[in-house]
Amino acid sequence: MPVIAVIGGQWGDEAKGKLVDLLAEQAKLVVRFSGGDNAGHTVINPFGEFKLHLIPSGIFYPQVKCIISNGVVINPAVLIDEIAKLNERGVTTDNLFISDRANLVMPYHLLLDGLEEEARGGKAIGTTRKGIGPAFTDKVARLGIRVGDLLDKEVLLERLRFALNYKNAILTKVYGAEPLSLDGIYQQYCQYGERLAPYICETTIILEEAVSRDDLILLEGAQGTLLDPDFGTYPYTTSSSPLAAGGCLGTGLGPTQIDRILGVFKAYSTRVGEGPLPTELKDKTGDLIRERAHEYGTTTGRPRRCGWFDAVAARFSTRINGFTDAAITRLDILDTLPSLKICVGYELGGKRINYFPASVAALEKCQPVYEELPGWQSPTTDIREPKDLPSEARQYLNRLEELIACPISLVAVGAKREQIIELRPLP
Ligand code: IMO
Ligand code: MG
């Protein structure tokens, strides 16, 4: 049984949670490896509808161990609330394990995320304001406080005193804000530590054991490839790597240990927050997609920007992740459209280009070059077999497969677990 990484191929919200919930039925381990509670993974299954931000989407299967690994930044208040809400609805979290190496989101990270965004003015990134950027900044600056520090109150106090001195200077001297109280945060984080202690452990051993038993392991990506700080639309990106490679650093698995990499793409494009979206539709079709698909942020409620499928961006995504399989989700949203466009190139300064430019300034000037395909104009939500797909839908998927340069294994035609068409076996 392989290790499969489930990776967002676009700008996030590709329905990674739905696929992980589905694939986890056969898995022994599901690991969230990057991001934080900026992620919003919607899962609809026999337990009901859930919006998960930190807990892996495998949590609904008691036989599946779920790990929040070192690469995630954890806001303990959000995690404790998520655990409580699952438990209230009859979902056990006895199978949850939290890496002692994961960094914590602290109250000053939340404040600074807001203050930094306001200071950027018209150049704001449109972050989720969950403190994610400031928490990853501190991790790299070696000012972070880690989950394991919660287990030793002396260490916690020492780390917090050191960090807070510095953070209070920034809050008061740079932003003219009020300083935060050491004692208040310390007491609060001691309580969080007591609540989370049963879950905290060395998670690489659990992974190693599962690998050696040849168990099916899923790495649950958060965000999407084009929000990667190296390869995405920098600076309009998030602060940790959503790429498959991030699944190695974020868990402690070696690069040779990931067997399959499933790139998840919506059948169209969406983006929430600022930054370029070359195929954005600011017209009735964009509104229609948004309303049919209820494209509003799971974490912030913001309306998502919608557009046609961008195959230039998707091809780039395959290249930098090494996708072995693709999943196309939300195909049913396109069911009513008379014709569909796919972006197959850009026009930049009078020239045709076929690559995804590094520079946001260039991307903003890119005009999409479209190919137009006929729509199928019939419902796909009840289809389970590839042969039952309308020929136009088949044609659309075949063209996407060619352009993405990766075989499509799964097609989702609705939010429910069973609304899936399997084209190739996975795993
Ligand atoms: P899932 O896992 C979509 C976006 C934010 C903003 C940028 C930076 O549900 O796919 P951050 O708070 O991370 O500093 O914000 O990244 N963003 C997401 N967009 N889906 C997500 O997660 C996102 N997580 C962050 O909107 O543009
Ligand atoms: Mg989401």
Image: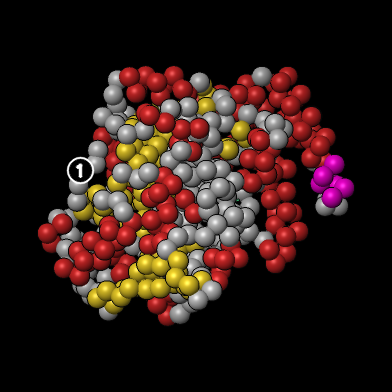
User: Which image quadrant is residue 27 in?
Assistant: top left
The residue most toward the front is: 351
Q: Position of residue 35 (x, y in %)?
A: 53, 43
Dot 1 falls on a residue whose secondary structure is: loop
Q: Is residue 262 left or right of residue 284?
A: left
Q: Residues within 10 Å of mark 1 (few under 14, many from 20)?
A: few
Residue 173 falls inside the magenta stretch: yes
Q: From the top left corner, tell me how far across and down residue 293 is, in percent.
A: 38, 66
| Residue 419 image offset from top left, x and y in percent | 24, 54
Image quadrant where one finds the N terminus: top left
Q: Which sits in the foreground, 394 or 346?
A: 346
In the rendered image, which quarter is residue 313 located in? bottom left
Ligand 1 has an atom within 8 Å of the beta carbon of the residue at disc 1: no
Q: Residue at x 15, y 57 (%)?
A: 386
- Quick one: quadrant of the C terminus? top left
Residue type at the position of mark 1: Pro
- Up/down of 195 relative to 222, above or below: above
Q: Residue at point 27% right, 70% down?
A: 335
Report the front residue among 119 and 141. Answer: 141
Q: Name the residue under label 1.
A: 425
In the rendered view, tell whether residue 416 sits above or below residue 163.
below
Can residue 16 be seen from the camera position used here?
Answer: no
Q: Nearer the viewer, residue 148 or 221?
A: 221
Q: Residue at x 35, y 45 (%)?
A: 323
Task: Residue at 16% x, 67% y: name it.
Answer: 390
Rendering coords of residue 281 (x, y %): 45, 74
| Image mark count | 1
Q: Does the magenta stretch include residue 55?
A: no
Q: What stretch is highlighted in magenta?
A: 169-174
Could you tell me if residue 215 is visible in this image?
yes
